[in-house]
Amino acid sequence: MRPWWLALCSLWLPSGRRPVRTPIRWLCLRAFVYLGVSSGTPLDSDKLDQLGQLLELGVFLNRCLDGKSTFCPIRYRRLRRGLPVEPLRRYLGALRRVERGRPDRTRWKCIALYRREVSDLSLLALFEIAGLGERPVLSPLVGLVQLVDDILDQEIDRTLDLPSLVGPLSPSTDEQAVWLWKELRGHHDGSDTPLVGMGFLVYLLARLVGHLHPRRW
């Protein structure tokens, strides 16, 4: 079956029982639904719920580390409950190591590497829990999503002095979007085509949001 037809069919498949509260999480779960179908191992509701839970845990930890939310031990334990032990242990251990080397906002190249490493850790844990082989095409796609997020959050990121992709010494958001799009479209595996198409839409969104919200550092 052609990849685009599989992608369209996968839109009608459930993405688990857990509520999906943001478009970004919905996009990520849709990508994994498609990857499961295209690889011949469709993900059941339990697996998709675990993926959604891990995404929520990652967002929670990121907001706490950034100082945007207060750490709540009860919520932390609730978000960990029921997730596969070994993948979760590896993910949290690797995340702690990366966060110890969090760069300051004046070192853009280090920030870009740090942000890519954090997102790749999340993807690795998601693929492991899903029982699917890694797909490098998702890394630059997530990078484009991060860029959009940093453009929209630049005011609060500046106030909290956070390592943002949209910082005082960073390249323009247009340049960053083009670099990520070039990396993304370099993936020529036929089954990656719908994900590249999805990435093109995020690329256009990044360009648009960058022009609507110019850098204010």
Image: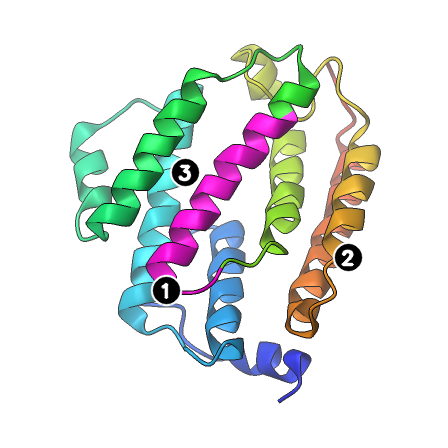
- Rendered image: mark on residue 185: 2
The answer, for residue 197, to whether it is visible in the render is yes
> Can you give x and y, in whole percent of width and height, for residue 121 in the image?
45, 41
Above or below: residue 89 compared with residue 169? below
Q: Which residue is depicted at the point 78% across and 32% down?
A: 173
Q: Which residue is depicted at the point 82% across and 42% down?
A: 178
Label 1, on which residue? 131
The answer, for residue 67, to whether it is visible in the render is no
Q: Which residue is depicted at the point 39% across and 49% down?
A: 125
Label 3, on which residue? 59
> Type of residue at label 3?
Val
Q: Secondary structure at mark 2?
A: helix
Q: Earlier in the sequence, mark 2 or mark 1?
A: 1
Judged by depth in the image, the label closer to the viewer, 3 or 1, is 1
> Type of residue at label 2?
Arg
Question: In the drawing, does residue 4 fall left or right of residue 68?
Answer: right
Give the main secondary structure, helix, strand or loop, of the magenta stretch: helix
Q: Secondary structure at mark 3?
A: helix
Q: Which residues are magenta?
A: 112-133
Classify mark 1: residues with Cα within 10 Å, few (<14), some (14-19) or many (20+).
Answer: few
- Looking at the picture, the colour scheme in use is rainbow
Q: Which residue is depicted at the point 65% across and 79% down?
A: 3
Q: Are marks 2 and 3 in contact (CB under 8 Å)?
A: no
